[in-house]
Image: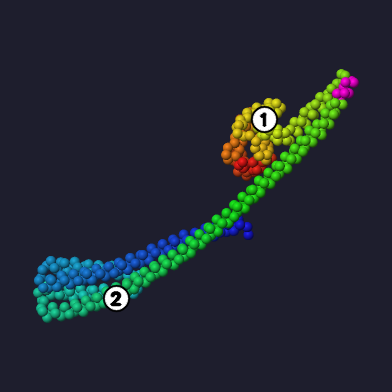
């Protein structure tokens, strides 16, 4: 399995773990919200029980005060407290409908409360009707104490049940929280480990790619060197071999022309030999300009540009910084080949007769800029060439590959 595939698997696994963390976090929040609602529910039941007890105590106080003093205000207060007791019992019955045990306890509470209220109502009625006696009052007090005990027993039972439910729900919430925290910690640790592995694999892949690019640049530089050596050899052969043969042919034709003056065929032959000699010399220089080895890039470029202008009328402005000087041989060769190919492309495709070549040197390296004033390229085609996503022709591909070994500092 390649490092690229391993890195992709590690990244996808980490992404899945992150997704799992998100889902688990959402589920945990929902469950915590549900448990929180149950906690609120238990708190509401306990508060309702306290209100029933509180209102029961107030009702008993106002009943006792009324039966003792006969104050009508105490009777009104008693009736109001009694109504609040019944409202509290109804509230308890509503909030305990989801719990069969507590709902049954709420029914018992209602029975005990109504029994207690009935006894207090009877005591109030006796006082209001003037039929109250100490014996009846004592009997009702005993019945009221018994009803109050039954009432308190149910309230305590319901309170204990809610405390048990509350403890169970708190424990469940704590377990959910601890389990979720543990799973999230493990998942987060796994994500960190996978992302670390991904970064290591990505670093290894980038390092391998950089090594491959270095190897490619070295190979390209070597190919350029071999190519230039071959061009130099061919150039020397053209100059020293074919050039000498053509010179000998011209000498022979010139001697023959002296014996046959006015021969048009011989004159044409001599002219053709002169043209062939000049073309051979030009091809020899284009294959490998001697000035490139002897005096450097600026002089070789000037010679080449002057030849282009002389042959095609193409005007090229040259702006070479004085600091350019001599450069490493591979760099000079690469820059010269790029200039050659660029000017050829401008002359063929740009539909212009003007270009500017600018070479600058800085601490970071050498900068070559070639500008034409032609029709340019369409944006889609230019973007395609920049992205190297399609065929670009031999010239542009050659310049791109030639540019690789030249990208260095010196």
Q: Which residue carries the number 2 mark?
A: 157
Cα distance between the residues tagged 2 and 1: 108 Å
The residue singled out by tag 1 in the image is 302
Compared across the picture, whether 51 is left or right of 334 comes to left
Instruction: Choose between 107 and 263: the one closer to the eye.
Output: 263
Residue 268 spot, x, y in % from top left: 83, 23
x and y percent of residue 180 in the render? 44, 65
**Residue 321 part of the magenta-drawn span:** no
**How many marks can you see?**
2
The magenta stretch spans residue 258 = yes
Give the quadrant of residue 337.
Answer: top right
Q: Is residue 280 above or below residue 50?
A: above
Q: Secondary structure at mark 2?
A: helix
Magenta region: which residues? Answer: 253-260
- Give me the residue at 13% from left, 78% from top: 137
Reading the chain from its start, which is encountered first: label 2 or label 1?
2
Q: Which mark is residue 44?
A: none
């Amino acid at each position: 399995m390649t490092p690229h595939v391993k890195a992709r698997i590690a990244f996808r696994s980490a992404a899945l773990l992150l997704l799992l963390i998100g889902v688990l976090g959402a589920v945990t929040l929902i469950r915590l919200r549900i448990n929180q609602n149950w906690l609120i529910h238990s708190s509401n039941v306990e508060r309702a029980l306290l209100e029933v007890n509180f209102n029961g105590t107030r009702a008993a106080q106002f009943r006792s005060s009324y039966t003792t003093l006969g104050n009508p205000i105490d009777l009104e207060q008693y009736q109001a407290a009694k109504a609040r007791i019944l409202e509290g019992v109804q509230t308890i019955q509503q909030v305990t409908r989801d719990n069969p045990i507590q709902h049954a306890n709420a029914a018992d509470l209602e029975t005990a409360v109504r029994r207690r209220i009935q006894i207090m109502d009877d005591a109030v009625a006796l006082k209001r009707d003037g039929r109250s006696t100490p014996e009846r009052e004592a009997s009702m007090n005993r019945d009221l104490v018994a009803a109050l005990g039954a009432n308190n027993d149910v309230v305590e039972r319901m309170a204990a049940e809610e405390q048990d439910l509350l403890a169970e729900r708190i424990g469940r919430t704590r377990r959910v929280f601890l389990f979720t925290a543990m799973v999230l910690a493990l998942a987060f640790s796994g994500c960190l480990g996978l992302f670390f592995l991904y970064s290591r694999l990505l670093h290894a892949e980038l390092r391998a790619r950089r090594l491959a690019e270095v190897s490619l640049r070295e190979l390209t530089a070597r190919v350029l060197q071999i190519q230039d050596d071959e061009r130099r050899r061919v150039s020397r052969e053209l100059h020293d071999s074919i050039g000498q043969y053509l010179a000998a042919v011209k000498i022979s034709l010139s001697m023959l022309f002296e014996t046959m003056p006015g021969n048009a065929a011989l004159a044409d032959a001599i002219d053709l030999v002169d043209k062939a000699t000049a073309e051979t010399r030009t091809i020899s220089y284009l294959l490998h300009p001697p000035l490139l080895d002897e005096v450097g890039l600026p002089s070789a470029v000037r010679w080449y540009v002057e030849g282009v202008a002389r042959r095609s009328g193409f005007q090229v402005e040259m702006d070479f910084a004085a600091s350019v000087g001599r450069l490493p041989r591979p760099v000079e060769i690469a820059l010269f080949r790029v200039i050659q190919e660029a000017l050829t492309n401008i002359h063929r495709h740009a539909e212009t007769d003007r270009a500017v070549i600018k070479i600058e040197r800085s601490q970071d390296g050498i900068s070559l800029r070639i500008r034409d004033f032609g029709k340019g390229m369409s944006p889609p085609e230019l973007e395609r060439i920049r992205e190297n996503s399609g065929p670009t022709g031999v010239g542009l591909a050659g310049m791109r590959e030639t540019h690789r070994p030249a990208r260095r500092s010196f």
